[in-house]
Image (cartoon, rainbow, N blue to C red):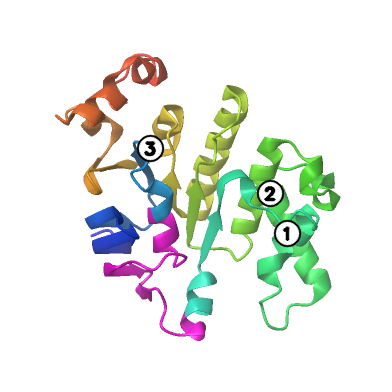
Amino acid sequence: MAETVISVRGLVTAFGRQVVHDGLDLEVTRGEILGVVGGSGTGKSVLLRTIVGLNRPQAGEIEVLGRRVPPRTEAERAALEGRIGVMFQDGALFSSLTVRENVEVPLRRVTGLAPRLRRELADLKISMAGLPWDAGGKYPSELSGGMRKRAGLARALAHDPEIVFLDEPTAGLDPIGAAEFDRLIRGLGDSLGLTVFLVTHDLDTLHAVCDRVAVLAERRVLVTGTMREMLDVDHPWVRDYFQGPRARAARPAGGQG
């Protein structure tokens, strides 16, 4: 039996009178790459932020790596944060810090880590994210959009996390840059044994990277399954998304996903 590392049960999230999720259930198993898709306003990013503890739900139960979310104490929060990494849209870097300093931010919370070792670890993560050797000394404003995303990924990897959460990692990238980022995510997942929770709208990313897909619709997870299994789902949005013209263009030649 595969180990469940993310468990969401009966989740209700709302902003005022606007209910985003109502009775949402989801499980993610260790080592898989799960793609989360859905129409505009279905709360994909809200779900990610709620699972990592940045949004407080109105009801339901969330466990990440066996720990309750939101954590009850600061010690529990610190313990969980040390085992997960988060990459927000466009990297969400601190503009006044260099790339290396951005990656060092989570490492500064590690007790007893010498500055020289912290710098070396940051440089290692920058290299793992596929950035050139001199990127560490640059500021976010000096980077392209794709490089900022890689810098954000390097920071998400700083703690050697067990789970990485990625929010629209290929949004705004040209097709070549997006394909390179897809290969990077797949390679890191395979080589490090990472579990990846990936919010995306990119069909190419779903085909290239994801083991399973979760579809958000009607305020819940409507269905989960492989890309091939999505083709058999009889729901208007799912059918249009996975079998429409763009889906056919993205589908690998000779395959069904």
The quadrant holding residue 131 is top right
Identify the residue position indicated by label 1 in the image. 102
Identity, as a three-letter code, of the amino acid under mark 3 = Ser
Q: Are marks 1 and 2 in contact (CB under 8 Å)?
A: yes
The quadrant holding residue 118 is bottom right
Q: Are marks 2 and 3 in contact (CB under 8 Å)?
A: no
Q: Who comes first in sequence, dot 1 or dot 2?
A: 1
- Which secondary structure, mark 1? helix
Nearer mark to the viewer, of 1 and 3: 3
Q: Tag count in the figure?
A: 3
Closer to the camera, 32 or 58? 58
The structure residue drawn at horizontal position 34% and vertical position 73%, both measured from the top left corner, is 66
The answer to whether residue 17 is above or below residue 78 is above
Identify the residue position indicated by label 3 in the image. 40
Identity, as a three-letter code, of the amino acid under mark 2 = Ala
The quadrant holding residue 217 is top left
Magenta-drawn stretch contains 68: yes
Residue segment shown in magenta: 47-76
The structure residue drawn at horizontal position 65% and vertical position 44%, both measured from the top left corner, is 150
* CA gap, disc 1 and disc 2: 8 Å
Residue 228 picture location, percent across and down: 25, 29
Identify the residue position indicated by label 2 in the image. 151
